[in-house]
Image (cartoon, rainbow, N blue to C red):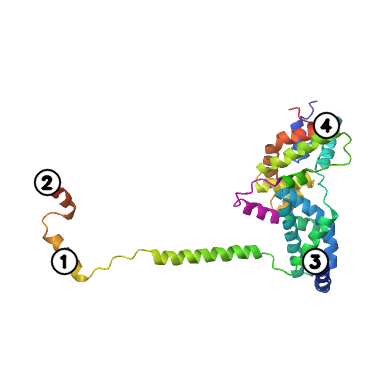
Amino acid sequence: MNHWTDDELLDHLYGLKADESHLAECSSCSSRAKHLAAARERAAEGPEITWDALAEQRRNIYRRLGEPLHSSRRFVWATSLAVLFVLMIGLTFLRTKPESRSDDQFYSEVSAIVQNPAPQAVQPIESLIEE
Amino acid sequence: MMGSMADGLEANLEARVGTREFGSWMLSEQKRIFLLCLRMLQDREEADSATQDSFLKAYRALCKQRDSELDEPGKWITRIAVNTCLDRLRSRKWQFWRKRPAPEDEALILATVPASEPNAEDEMHSVQVRERLQRAMERLSDRQRAVFTLRHYEGRSLEGIAEILGLDVGTVKMHLFRAVNKLRTDLHDLYFGSKR
């Protein structure tokens, strides 16, 4: 009979072993598993918490019974909303406005383009050739 | 002064919600819930605050549904505490400046001296391994940490953990499997000594 390995015993301890039938048949593994369970209980013992610390904690709980629970969460929400509001205001005012041109300016620019024999995009190259 | 104020508040509230009943129930569960929070959060101050929040949430929930009887108040407060800790762990991810607990918190978490240990050397080794295990738990995801804490420290069944966390047993098993695999070397040292 093959005994369980340490890893298999660990898996059993944490409820991860699929087939546990071996334990019923093997007293050695069963004994080791019990020993391991006892070791887990010992390892899980908590640190000393003084009675005074717990009493102080209870006093704080009683004191907080009359206060809203999520005051800090509300503060976070309020801050977020305020920041969002400021950002929106800032974006509204900082956005660059398109240049306003009068109708006369616009028509004169259009007529200049129309009268020019070469397209506007070619003008820089033309000036190079002229030189 | 503060104590008498709190006692006065307690007396005033008693007529309304049965604070004395709540108080005696809290007394029976407080240490366990505080330890649970301490193990999940690994920070004494935060665990203290999470414990307070948990009992406050419980109290308010009881105020709202005064007539309904709780079948398993122990499981119920555990669920509230675990969820409170999970919330805090999630929000902690934004707090990049606090990656590790303060040394004095670590010392408190790890200052476990079971009376049954006969040998001082074994005891020292045991404390060191537990310290390593606590540090190693930082590698676990929030859910894995919750599942492992409930199994390792509270010895709960997978079904019980599933009920507390509102997950199915398969999911709990998966989280636990991953947690145990991440901690396998440390667990091996804890239970079998550092022979590996």
Residue B40: horizontal and vertical position, in percent? 72, 49
Query: What residue is shown at x 14% (from left), y 62% (from top)?
Result: A112
Residue beneath label 1, please? A108
Say which quadrant the N terminus of chain B sits in.
bottom right
Residue B55: horizontal and vertical position, in percent? 76, 61
Q: What SS does tag 4 mark?
A: helix
Marked residue nearer the N-terminal end (1 or 4): 4
Mark 1 → mark 4, Cα distance in angstroms:
99 Å
Q: For mark 3, name the chain.
A: B
Q: Residues within 10 Å of mark 2 (few under 14, many from 20)?
A: few
Residue beneath label 4, please? A29
Residue B72: horizontal and vertical position, in percent? 80, 58
Q: What SS does tag 3 mark?
A: helix
A30 with respect to B50 (left or right): right
Query: What residue is shown at x 83% (from left), y 59% (from top)?
Result: A55
Marked residue nearer the N-terminal end (2 or 4): 4
Mark 4 → mark 3, Cα distance in angstroms:
56 Å
The amino acid marked with disc number 3 is Met
Residue beneath label 3, please? B2
Q: Where does the magenta region start and end?
A: B83-102
The amino acid marked with disc number 4 is Cys
Q: Are marks 1 and 3 on the same chain?
A: no
Residue beneath label 2, please? A129
The quadrant in which residue A113 appears is bottom left
- Looking at the rendered image, the disc whose residue lies closer to the viewer, 3 or 2, is 3
